[in-house]
Amino acid sequence: QVHLVESGGGLVQPGGSLRLSCAASGINFRLYAMKWYRQVTGKERELVASMDSSGTTEYADSVKGRFTITRNNVRNTLYLQMNNLEPEDTATYYCNVGAYGREFWGRGTQVTVSL
């Protein structure tokens, strides 16, 4: 059974930073591309960043230069370092992996950027 557990969200002021973590189990983590998505209530889920098994990364234009996706293949953990946060970054952030012919999601962690 694949499990993804996100953590690290919270309330932060504009310009602040947070680091999200996603602990993965049930997969050979190092072999899989991993992704961060975010979703605002009432809107579609948006791909924020991805990292494939070779370490190649991609980012949404809205977060380029501010967010950094990394992974630790020993700890089976995915990270998202978020700097210079903006109110528009407020959302629930989800970890995602495609494995065994389907998509797996964590329960998400809430990020709120506000004064």
Image: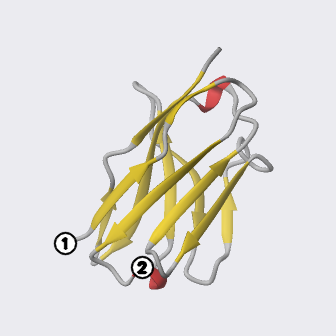
> Crowding at label 2, few (<14), some or many (≥20) Cα neighbours within 10 Å?
many
> Crowding at label 1, few (<14), some or many (≥20) Cα neighbours within 10 Å?
few
107 relative to 10 in the view: left or right: left
Residue 50 lies in quadrant = bottom right
Q: Tell me which numbered mark, 1 or 2, is placed earlier along the sequence.
A: 1
CA gap, disc 1 and disc 2: 13 Å
* Secondary structure beneath label 2: helix
The residue sitting at 65% across, 52% down in the picture is 81
The residue sitting at 25% across, 69% down in the picture is 2
Q: Residue 44: percent from the left, percent from the top?
A: 45, 36
Label at residue 11: none
The residue sitting at 33% across, 60% down in the picture is 4
Q: Residue 97: percent from the left, percent from the top?
A: 40, 66
Which quarter of the rendered picture does the N terminus lie within? bottom left
Q: Residue 94: percent from the left, percent from the top?
A: 43, 48
Label at residue 1: 1
Residue 54 lies in quadrant = bottom right
Color encoding of the figure: secondary structure
Residue 95 lies in quadrant = bottom left
- What residue type is disc 2 on? Phe
Q: Residue furthest left?
A: 1
Q: Is residue 62 above or below residue 105?
A: above
Q: Residue 96: percent from the left, percent from the top?
A: 41, 60
* Secondary structure beneath label 1: loop
**Residue indicated by mark 2:** 29
The residue sitting at 61% across, 32% down in the picture is 89
42 relative to 18 in the view: left or right: left
52 relative to 8 in the view: left or right: right
- What residue type is disc 1 on? Gln
